[in-house]
Image: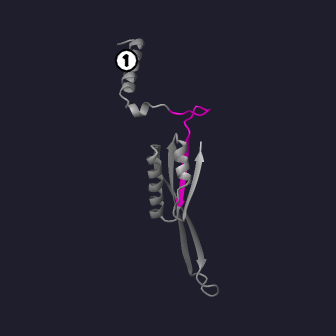
Amino acid sequence: MPDKKTIKSHESASTEKQNAKKPAHSRKAKVVGPEGEVPHLRIRVRAYEHKILDASLKQIMDTAARYEAEIHGPVPLPTEIKKYTVNRSSFIDKNSREQFEMRVHKRLIDIVNPNPKVIEALRNMSLPSGVNIDVKMS
């Protein structure tokens, strides 16, 4: 049975091999914030129609990819469903009711280590009406 020192040396050799196999693009320098975190933009997009939402996401991702930004997503978030029940008639037919629902589809995109050109391009982008976008930088 090998002793603990030889086991540790085999583990360190395997991690060195894994690091050597990484492609060159994953080893590029990244800007690190004051807390030791890489800055990123978190974009939440909301819309009532999922087709318009997906078209807007494609436009955002194409804009970010044009400036060679690293994109994570789109991540589908749970659809928010609001249900409303109303009376069909105001007087006699109390038990006759109608139900309506409103669906809000949501998606999330992260842009890691954005440069100023990406931020400016996203700010000047025009999206279709009915699409709500929230951008947070951290």
Name the side, left or right, on which 22 lies relative to 111.
Answer: left
Crowd tier of the residue under label 1, counting other residues whose Cα lies within 10 Å: few below 14, some 14–19, many 20 or above:
few
Residue furthest bottom as drawn = 92
Q: Residue 8 appears at what percent x and percent y?
A: 42, 16
Q: Nearer the viewer, residue 95 or 79?
A: 79
Query: In the image, what residue type sits under mark 1?
Result: His
Quadrant in which the N terminus appears? top left
Counting labels gives: 1
Residue drawn at point x = 45 percent, y = 60 percent? 55
Q: Residue 87 appears at what percent x and percent y?
A: 60, 80
> Magenta region: which residues?
30-46
Residue 20 occupies which quadrant of the picture? top left
Q: Residue 94 appears at what percent x and percent y?
A: 61, 82
Residue on which the image places disc 1: 10
Q: Residue 52 appears at what percent x and percent y?
A: 47, 63
Residue furthest right as drawn = 91
Residue 20 lies in the magenta stretch: no
Residue drawn at point x = 56 percent, y = 68 percent? 83
